[in-house]
Amino acid sequence: MKYLNIICKRLTALLSAVLRRFLRLVSSAEEDDASIMQQRIELYRGRGMKIGENCYISDVTFGQDGKDPIIVGNNCVLTKCIILGHDASPALYIRELQGKGLFDRISISRTTEIKDDCFVGVNAIIMGGVTVGPRSIVGAGSVVTRDVPSGVVVTGNPARVICTIEAYIEKHRRQMQGHPEWYPGLKLKHPDNHA
Ligand SMILES: CC(C)(COP(=O)(O)OP(=O)(O)OC[C@H]1O[C@@H](n2cnc3c(N)ncnc32)[C@H](O)[C@@H]1OP(=O)(O)O)[C@@H](O)C(=O)NCCC(=O)NCCS
């Protein structure tokens, strides 16, 4: 019995050491990701783009070289999408837009703006000159060719409004009650909890 107790204690100590090490590894990986993303944001800012605070920007392609006139507001989540600020296609055909070399061509350059609190889904393309209004969602794979109003969800190619953000939130709140298992980590304190 005495030996069994000793073995149990040693096993518990070993397991908690392994767990501590694992947690340290996971948390440092998250810190690394956050710092890489912050460095990337500073790089974009250094190239003249305006990017607000508290933005999650993951592997986004901004134009071709990051010099396009692009403004991103505060609290935005941009997943792996493409945000254009220019269009070089006319220069291939119009002599007045051509320079001496390939890199001297004149592109159409129009400010593209993502206002505060927007979410842009994976593989979405925001065309040059478009403004996405505050608190709007651009669905995965959408091609946004025209301005998006504030507080809506748009999807498709070309992107069209499918609902308001209020209807979207309401739908997800109902879903959180009906299928809490779809939201890992969610703790509903009360059936009416809307947190
Ligand atoms: C746009 C979005 C927010 C809509 O969410 P939702 O309201 O829960 O969507 P639903 O599944 O109820 O679909 C509603 C309708 O829009 C359509 N739809 C949804 N997402 C779409 C998309 N990305 N493109 C085209 N149509 C889409 C659905 O087919 C459905 O059409 P129907 O009513 O004719 O059947 C969501 O589909 C989306 O694209 N989220 C972004 C996901 C992403 O990129 N994540 C990155 C990693 S975090």
Image (spheres, rainbow, N blue to C red):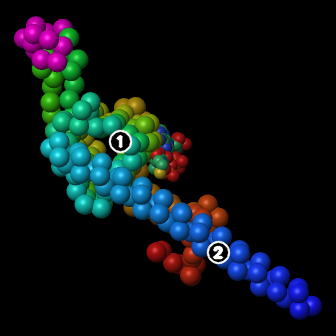
- Asked if 72 appears above or below 20 in the picture, the reply is above
Q: Which residues are magenta?
A: 93-104
Q: Position of residue 162 (x, y in %)?
A: 42, 46
Label 2: element kind: helix
Q: For the N terminus, give its image quadrant.
A: bottom right
Q: Position of residue 3 (x, y in %)?
A: 88, 87
Drawn side of residue 56 relative to residue 141, left or right? left
Q: Which residue extends farthest right? A: 1
Observer-side mark, 1 or 2, equals 2
Q: Please report the residue visible at 84 percent of the width from the left and 88 percent of the height from the top.
A: 5
Indicate the quadrant where residue 161 lies.
Answer: top left
**The disc label shown at residue 22, or none:** none
The three-letter amino acid code for the residue at tag 1 is Val
Contact between marks 1 and 2 (CB within 8 A): the answer is: no
Label 1: element kind: loop
Q: Is residue 100 magenta?
A: yes
Label 2 crowding class (10 Å Cα cut-off): few <14, some 14-19, many 20+?
few
| Count of number-bearing discs | 2
* Of residues 181 and 172, the one drawn nearer to the viewer in this rendering: 181
The three-letter amino acid code for the residue at tag 2 is Ala
Q: Is residue 163 magenta?
A: no
Question: What residue sits right under mark 2 in the picture?
Answer: 17
Question: What residue sits right under mark 1 in the picture?
Answer: 60
Q: Please report the residue visible at 15 percent of the width from the left and 44 percent of the height from the top.
A: 48
